[in-house]
Amino acid sequence: MHPIMLDVAGCELTAQEQEIIGHPLTGGVILFARNYYDPQQLRHLTAQIKASASHPILIGVDQEGGRVQRFIEGFTSVPAMGAIASNAESEALANACGTVIAAECLGHGVDISFAPVLDINGISEVIGQRSFSANVSQIDTLARAFIQGMTQWGMPAIGKHFPGHGNVQADSHIAMPVDERSETVIFERDMAVFARLITDELLAGMMPAHVVYPNIDDQPAGFSTIWLQQILRQKLGFEGVIFSDDLSMHAATQAGDMLSRVENALAAGVDMALICNAPDEAIKVLDNLGHTAKHQAHYSTRAQGLVSVNAQTVNHYQQLLSHPNYHAAVERIQQASD
């Protein structure tokens, strides 16, 4: 019913942002490094966001570890997932990373981190050490341990970038990656990581890649009914939330202006469309995408099922941050970094 996730400018909401968050199409807010300077401020901001919404609203972040970690000061420094495999106790370390990311985000009012990255560490310029490994079996093992760490704290796992971004060199933020490999290779290698975790019902959400796989479809995966409906939903049986990757990225521009990108993504099967770093475009979408009761009845309600944090549960998670399991996980990460 509320299919748009957007961002905000700073560490506190403006009056205009409070109005935008209260719009019936706004279903989520994604936070970036610019939205954070310390834990107390973050709890205040997430409380502001929740209070401004006219319905349950999902707050997300890319808190993967390594170079993709938006909250730094006052949060545990989590290693890049690519650094975990070489640790003598790699599964335990992966579990600790999932535990710490989930506990610290939930404890500050953030419902989800868009993690784990399930891409193979191949030739991609933008994936690299964000991936657990170049080995499919090792990715599967470490991702499961990481997800167990997340979910034991109540944070759902969001796999990305389906069906795999690791074997195309171009960065979809600034180019249009095209993966020319055969359907067989993609399905049996890259997509196999996602398929195994879907089969075992370990992923609550999925983010498709802004990559074209021309041997399957001429549309990027995030705009493709073949990828999202025929393969992800029907063939693999995925029943969770499909989030678009950022529709402001260069690889999304072939779908037209921002309103067209959102409409095409939703029509392809996306449940929640992300518009980042383009506030004027986000406003245009909210103004022009249908939001009457009749329109809203056609939008997915899946994403709202991931909203789990409110004022009471923030206090609950703050208390759990004193739990010995959390402190043991922090200690394991710190020891691995020494």
Image (cartoon, rainbow, N blue to C red):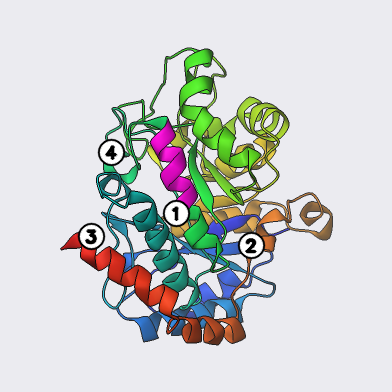
> Gap between marks 4 and 1, in whole Å?
18 Å
**Residue 46 or 146: which is nearer the viewer?**
146
Residue 277's x, y, as percent?
A: 40, 56
- Three-letter code, disc 1: Phe
* Residue 102, x across and y down, in percent: 47, 66
How many discs appear? Answer: 4
Tell which of 298 and 170 is nearer to you.
Answer: 170
**Which badge, 2 or 3, comes first in the chain's sequence?**
2
Task: Give SS at disc 1.
Answer: helix
- Residue 128 got which mark? 4
Q: Which residue is mark 3?
A: 336
Residue, disc 1: 146
Q: Main secondary structure of the magenta part?
A: helix
Q: Can you say which quadrant of the picture contains the N terminus?
A: bottom right
Mark number, residue 306:
2
With respect to residue 92, does 132 lie above or below?
above
Mark 3 residue type: Ala
Magenta residues (range): 137-146
- The residues tagged by marks 1 and 3 sit, at their Cα atoms, a distance apart of 15 Å
Label 3 to label 4, Cα distance in Å? 20 Å
Residue depth check, mark 2 versus mark 3: number of the one nearer the observer: 3
In the rendered image, residue 145 lying in the magenta stretch gets the answer yes
Between residue 112 and residue 5, name the one nearer to us: 112
Q: What is the three-letter code of the residue carrying label 2?
A: Leu
Q: Is residue 264 left or right of residue 131?
A: right
Residue in front for this viewpoint, 35 or 186? 186
Image coordinates for residue 192, horizontal then vertical, percent? 52, 29
Q: Earlier in the sequence, mark 3 or mark 4?
A: 4
Q: Residues within 10 Å of mark 2 (few under 14, many from 20)?
A: many
Assess disc 1: are there few (<14), some (14-19) or many (≥20) residues with their C-alpha within 10 Å of its C-alpha. Answer: many
In 3D space, how far apart are the residues under numbered discs 4 and 2 (Cα atoms)? 28 Å
